Amino acid sequence: MATQAFEDIAETFEFLDDWEDRYAHVIDMGREMAPLDDAFKVPATKVDGCASQVWLVPKVEDGVFTFEGASDAMIVSGLIAILHALYNDLSVADVAAVDARAEFERLGLNDHLSAQRSNGLRAMIERIRSVTA
């Protein structure tokens, strides 16, 4: 159950055969995200369990989930962009139904992230799910 934005990412990944190209695309997606206001880069929004600095600012309005995020690491910013495509603008019920691990497996990212990056990704997903639980 993926959004169209995530499906677009999956299609692009199918087109990119080389992992260096895929990583470059992930980094580019992170660079294209709107910057997070420094006022939101506070301990309350910081995601624990990430090797790099990560901040997520989730919102639920009228039963619809959205979030903003940022990281000081380029690849992690790209992972945030992918999570944004996967979860943003879903209903709270739909957020709970997303199998993020399976969706990231579709991209092949699970096999190409370091253990620290995988732990950080898991922490970001847990933060998103905790807001909508």
Image (tube, helix red, strand yellow):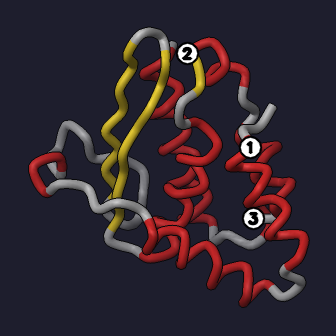
In the rendered image, the vertical position of residue 96 relative to residue 86, given as above or below: above
Horizontal and vertical percent position of residue 33? 42, 62
Q: CA distance from mark 3 to mark 2?
A: 25 Å
Question: Which residue is found at the position 73% from the left and 87% from the top?
Answer: 21
43 vs 121, left or right, is left
The numbered mark, 2 or 1, whose residue comes first in the sequence reads: 1
Horizontal and vertical percent position of residue 90? 59, 26
Could you say whether the residue bearing mark 2 is in a helix, strand or loop?
Answer: helix
55 vs 40, left or right, is right
- Report the residue marked by disc 3: 109
The numbered mark, 3 or 1, whose residue comes first in the sequence reads: 1
Tell me the amino acid under the disc marked 1.
Answer: Gln
Horizontal and vertical percent position of residue 12? 80, 69
Of badges 3 and 2, nearer the viewer stands: 2
How many neighbours does mark 3 have within 10 angstroms: few (below 14), some (14-19), or many (20 or more)? some
In the rendered image, the vertical position of residue 116 relative to residue 106, given as above or below: below
Q: Are marks 3 and 2 in contact (CB under 8 Å)?
A: no
Q: Please tell me how many numbered marks the rendered image carries.
A: 3
In the rendered image, the vertical position of residue 121 relative to residue 51, given as above or below: above
Horizontal and vertical percent position of residue 18? 84, 88
- Report the residue marked by disc 1: 4
Quadrant of the rendered image containing residue 66: top left
Question: Which residue is found at the position 40% from the left and 38% from the top?
Answer: 67
The numbered mark, 3 or 2, whose residue comes first in the sequence reads: 2
Of badges 2 and 1, nearer the viewer stands: 1
